[in-house]
Amino acid sequence: MNSAMTRRRRKLLALAGAVAAAPTLLCACAHSVRASDGVDAALHLAGDSTMATKALEPALPERGWGQMLRARAWQPLRIVNHAAGGRSTRSFRDQGKWQRLVDALRPGDFVIIQFGHNDQKVGDPARHAEARTTYRENLACFVDEVRERGATPILATPVVRRKFDAEGRLVETLGDYPATMREVANAKNVPLLELNRASAYLVQSLGPEQAKRLYMWIEPGTHPRWPDGLRDDTHFSAAGADAIAQMAIDEMRRLRLPTADWFR
């Protein structure tokens, strides 16, 4: 194992320990804005519910990692989160969300693109995009259209769900979608945030019980909206979304992307 990989794993283990030890969910409030560095570029986010901004009022425990990424920015207004629940590469375009993002781009901007969870919904033709064909083509088109606007695309492999087998090993539920994202990034020479492997390592390190803190697991009688409790292994708590946001920042730093300096 090379030294860079060792350092990344040490960071993830430290993050796992912090999540396991945290007595409460992390705050989603914006932080102080650093003095302007004179750059007007924006970072746009395109994705699904795992990335999307969730309502703070009335108080709900679910957060998206793009929402927490914005909270970690020195200048939060530079982070524009277009991600929306239930969207795939197909429906994000068909419903006009991608065009609105493209219309907002300016030369010098950046776009992080993360899809996969809803593309795999075979029974839903409005969202399904087969991994090796339509999904691949959609990602390639997204990359080309961002570049046509003078902006920089950044791909991110989709984050894992919390699913373990009987022996306590994490089960990959996303099929060929993470691999296809990697292949498109390689073929198109696009920076890749490896959130799938990083989140898998974190969830596996925490184990089946402690990993529940990352997701929307609510005990019965603890929240008025879900009096009988909730078991959701896809969507993130504030702690989980913040952990993924930190992974995204670490990946930007590993890749030496200009956006890495935008975050605390």
Image (cartoon, rainbow, N blue to C red):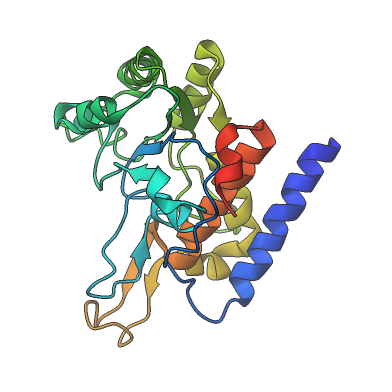
Asked where in the image residue 166 lies, by quadrant, the reply is: bottom right
Considering the image in quadrants, where does the N terminus appear?
Answer: top right
State the residue lying farthest toward the bottom: 221
> Vertical placement of 205 versus 96: above or below?
below
Considering the image in quadrants, where does the C terminus appear?
Answer: bottom right
| Rendered residue at 60%/41% (across/down) | 260
Q: How many marks?
A: 0
Q: Is residue 21 left or right of residue 242?
A: right
Choose between 57 and 185: the one closer to the eye.
57
| Residue 73 visible from this viewpoint | yes
Q: Is residue 121 left or right of residue 193?
A: left
| Rendered residue at 29%/59% (across/down) | 54
| Rendered residue at 24%/72% (across/down) | 57
| Rendered residue at 73%/49% (across/down) | 9
Q: How far across and how far down the image is residue 71, in percent?
A: 45, 58
Asked where in the image residue 40 lies, by quadrant, the reply is: top left
Q: How far across and how far down the image is residue 95, in percent?
A: 14, 32
Q: How far across and how far down the image is residue 214, in percent?
A: 49, 64
Q: How far across and how far down the image is residue 13, in percent?
A: 71, 58
Asked where in the image residue 243 lies, by quadrant, the reply is: bottom right
| Residue 127 visible from this viewpoint | no
> Vertical placement of 226 versus 8: above or below?
below
> Vertical placement of 95 versus 6: above or below?
above
